[in-house]
Image (cartoon, rainbow, N blue to C red):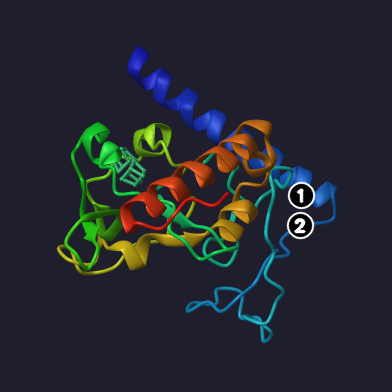
Amino acid sequence: MSIGRGVIRGHWITLRRFLLTFARDVRDGLALTRRGGGPQALDLFRSPARGEERVVVQDEHTDGLFTVEYPDERLPVYERFRMLPVLVYDDEDGNVRCTSCNICAKVCPPQCIWMVQAKSPKGTVVPLPEDFFIDMDVCMNCGLCAEYCPFDAVKMDQNFELANSERHQTHVFSLQDLLVSSAYYAQTHPEAWSSDDETSERAKVAKKKDQRLRKALGVPAQS
Ligand code: SF4
Ligand code: SF4
């Protein structure tokens, strides 16, 4: 008997919320007007202009009867939202920040990072990755690689739209798939980019990396 009452109560809460939301939309003059647009296979409202409406990007203040009509509409993600790691190269000189030190691979809990270190023509080790791989299906988005990287080279990206129909190869990202510019990172993480911590870290690692590269390639240090 008590189970039956619980079910009825749950349904009542849902119905009440639905009716209140509907009433609020009518009160605010939104009623059954679809907000947002974009092409849609099935047009339940038989609107002649269906698919030509302006695409609306909803924000955290948007509410009402209609839910976010993904993928025509998207809620903006928070800056700290993290999905998968990327490798940053600097726009000024085009240099990859990664020195192939292997620390991220060691700290990665599911061990889904591996890399090939670059070699000079003489066969000596150069602090750059020749290739770099992350198995995105194994990555658990913990962000430890980005935390531990001593060269500020790994950052967590916000892109979550990576679905496809191939299970084995497509999600093993190589260096070319992983590279993003510092301008891209600055744009997706404006607060972090301009913070004192990251500004001083950038200056520090640029100098450190330059010294290591020069040493490996036998180029004299700049005075
Ligand atoms: S920890 Fe940073 S510098 Fe070291 S291999 Fe990983 S990404 Fe490259
Ligand atoms: S986010 Fe975590 S699981 Fe994914 S590659 Fe980095 S350390 Fe590994």
Can you see residue 102? yes
Dot 2 or dot 1: first in sequence order is: 1
Mark 2: which amino acid? Ala
Asked whether mark 1 and ligand 2 are closer than 8 Å, the reply comes as no
Q: Residue furthest top?
A: 2
User: Based on the displayed image, in which of its 4 quarters is residue 39 positioned?
Assistant: bottom right
Binning the other alpha carbons within 10 Å of mark 2 as few (below 14), some (14 to 19) or many (20 upward) gives: some
Q: Which quadrant is home to the N terminus?
A: top left
Q: Residue at x 61, y 59 (%)?
A: 183
Q: Are marks 2 and 1 in contact (CB under 8 Å)?
A: yes
Estimate the x, y position of residue 54 in percent, counting from the top left: 72, 74
92 vs 167, left or right, is right
Of helix, strand and loop, which one carries label 1?
A: helix
**Residue 67 seen anywhere in this rendered image of the structure:** no
Query: How many residues crowd mark 1 within 10 Å: few (<14), some (14–19), many (20+)?
Result: some
> Which of the 4 image quadrants contains residue 38?
bottom right
Please tell me in which quadrant of the rendered image residue 141 appears.
Answer: top left
The circle on residue 31 is 2
- Residue that carries the numbered disc 1 in the rendered image: 25
